[in-house]
Image (tube, grey):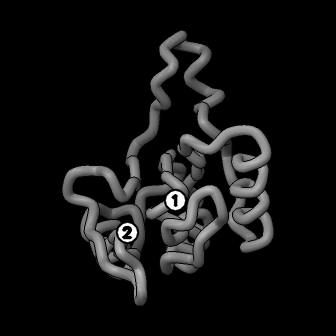
Amino acid sequence: MAIRNAIIAVDFDGTVVTHAYPEIGEDAGAVPVLRELTGNGCRLILYTMRHGALLTEAVEWFRRHGIPLYAVNENPAQRRWTSSPKIHADLYIDDSNLGCPLRFAEGEKRPVADWTRIREQLVREGFLD
């Protein structure tokens, strides 16, 4: 049985989409996995360096793909117990994380998150069935 109600912080550029900053890249394979996570009750926090109009575009990307966000660049629940700016989450998915599986997208010079292998890890760790 999958872990329910986990809070997962997820990076955007190079993780959810291929590298194209300041534009928005192509889906890196994240859409079905993120939908599966939210379908299992996980709450996603978009955790990104984007700001202003570029952040708005990223948030809109999630809306267009039917992926609900719990929050953006914050965990609103943690205000009750800390004033730290570090976002509290049960799991962080970021192409810059040590150990995050990576792959090279066709024609890309920089690797992106490998969502096939990330999904396998999420199953092993109990976040997905």
Secondary structure of residue under mark 1:
loop
Nearest the viewer among 21 and 78 is 21
Q: Secondary structure at mark 2?
A: strand
The label nearer to you, 1 versus 2, is: 1
Single out the residue that lies furthest toward the bottom: 106
State which tag comes first along the sequence, 1 or 2.
1
Where in the figure is residue 114, as x and y percent of width and height?
A: 35, 75
Farthest-out residue, left: 99
Amino acid, disc 2: Ala
Quadrant of the snapshot with the C terminus? bottom left
Q: Of residues 35 and 13, which is closer to you in this image?
A: 13
Residue 17 at x, y percent in the picture: 54, 69
Q: Give the answer, above or below, for where 61 lies relative to 103.
A: above
Question: Which quadrant is the N terminus positioned in?
Answer: bottom left
- How packed mark 1 is, by other alpha carbons closer than 10 Å (few <14, some 14-19, many 20 or more), is many
Q: Which circle marks residue 107 in the picture? A: none
Viewer-nearest residue: 104 or 64: 104
Q: Residue at x 39, y 48 (%)?
A: 92
**Dot label at residue 13:** 1
Residue 77 appears left or right of 115 = right
Rounded to the nearest angstrom, the CA distance separating label 1 from label 2 is 10 Å
Residue 101 appears at what percent x and percent y? 26, 68
Among the 4 quarters of the image, the one containing residue 52: top right
Mark 1: which amino acid? Asp
**Is 88 rendered above or below residue 69?**
above
Mark 2 crowdedness (10 Å alpha carbons): few <14, some 14-19, many ≥20: many
Q: Quadrant of residue 66?
A: bottom right
Q: Which mark is residue 113?
A: 2
Q: Using the image as rendered, state which of residue 109 and residue 10 is in the foreground.
A: 109
